[in-house]
Image (tube, rainbow, N blue to C red):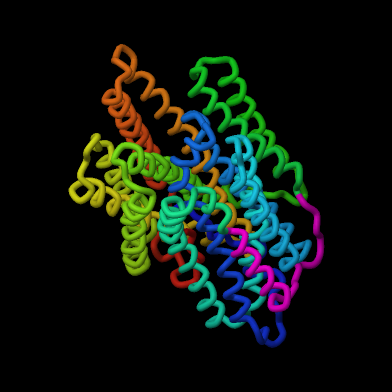
Amino acid sequence: MPGTTSTVPGAPGAGTSTGAPHPRRWIALAVIAVSQLMVVLDATIVNIALPKAQVDLGITDANRQWVITAYTLAFGGLLLLGGRIADYWGRKRTFLVGMTGFALASALGGLATTGGTLFAARALQGAFGALLAPAALALLTVLFTEATERAKAFAVYGAIAGGGSAVGLLLGGVLTEYADWRWCLLVNIPVAAIAIAFALPLVPESRAHGNTRYDVPGAIVVTAGLVSLVYGFTKAAEDGWDAAATLGFIAAGVLLLAAFVVIELRSNHPLLPLRIILDRNRGGAYLTSTLIGAGLFGAFLFLTFYFQVVLQYKPLEAGLASLPVTAGVLIAAGGASQLMPRVGAKPLMVGGAVLAAVGMLVLTQIDVDTSFLTLLLPAQVILGMGLGFTFVPLSSLALVGVPEHDAGAASATLNATQQIGGSLGTALLNTLYTSAVAAYLVGRAPNPVNQVEALVHGYRVAFAWGAALIVLAGLATLILVRVRKEDIPTGNAVHMG
């Protein structure tokens, strides 16, 4: 689900204390869990607020996806660098800076008077989130050195990540309906203030030693390349796919990403060691994660608009109506954990992709007055179960066989692929949606009935393309993954949310 559960570079073995356990580690866990909840909430809480924010700030349909992609691009593009900074600069210090910056960015977004200001605030949230999330997880690794206690701590952390998306949907609905959409961002300020006040006396400082160089050029180039690609997709919605600006930005994005590969090959301290992704199974897992994220994030965006704009659900009703996906994920995740030792990762990932694609295809059958119980509810549960069956084995596959010194980078890369895939997919699906709506209205009278029909047609097109991306994810698993079930460890993988 849209959310963030990252593993920090170096986390499994870097900077682990060898002394007695920290006496206030369980209280510190509560502080860290609050920070994780705040970051995860922002992946879904804004979705519910977006229809009202779009109207209030006069954001166009072509540009509204930047409210989502500005956050996910900055977060995904800077996540690996954020982990390095946390390790070398100090995890507590990075945690506090990330928390403070996230709160200030939230204030900027909550007080925004233009779409551009809101986009900038969301990008800043993503950048500070890329500091906050890996620092928080690294602190857990340092605080909990005994295996049983660490397992319990990570279980709490994982539960926050898994349940945070659902809490975000509900809280976003409550705040948007009974207060104002701006409070979906402003609510982060008191939460951050409380977390900082408790973190200062309770959370210990720690840092990794040795070489502390950063791959800043790699971080800048990969983020610029991704932004250029997304902007190219956005220009396609405005000017067409054959426009010079569209082709120019897409080409620049591809060239910058190629340059990033060259930088990583030549760097002595690469942001992303390419040996991690060149392993066939791991590379297949990352590609699957990217494609699933691309199909999924956009689908949630359009489902929110369908609920509120077409079916006229109130924000809280829209939040409640989106919960079946979360329920499906939780049901399937438990089943996947039990089935993986018996059938292996690949069959579950392929089957999960098929199931998720089926759920998305069912959503293409929506109309202007579709029944929630007979179509929307089962479609979302099927979609969620497909995601649960996919991501549990995928997260284990992404880590199997990784050397200890690469384990943090490998797991953080998995999180980054979900965010980056979500960014590119949201931009692409929004462009296809906008084009479909415009094409539908050609030759038709611009009356309210045709306007609503055009919106529904656009949503159907977006869901169909989302299903296609998820099918591609299943094919990537089928073709690239060659792992045997006995090669996947059970019980010690960090799952992604």
- Image coords of residue 149 (percent x, y): 55, 82
Residue segment shown in magenta: 188-214
| Identity of the residue furthest to the front in this view | 179
Q: From where the camera sits, is residue 273 visible?
A: no
Which residue is pictured at 31% across the width and 41% down the height?
312
Total tally of numbered discs in the picture: 0
| Residue 242 is a magenta residue | no
- Residue 41, above or below 293: below
Q: Is residue 181 left or right of residue 201?
A: left
Residue 59 lies, with reference to residue 150, above or below; the image says above
Q: Residue at x 72, y 57 (%)?
A: 84
Regarding residue 256, the answer to whether it shows in the image is: yes
User: As drawn, is 197 to the left or to the right of 454?
Assistant: right
Query: Is residue 156 left or right of 35 when viewed as pictured?
Result: left
Q: Which residue sits furthest top?
A: 443
Residue displayed at 52% across by 32% down: 59
The x and y percentages for residue 80 are 65, 53
Pick whichever, 208 or 264, lies toward us: 208
- Compared to residue 495, the image places residue 437 above or below, namely above
Above or below residue 92? Residue 103 is: above
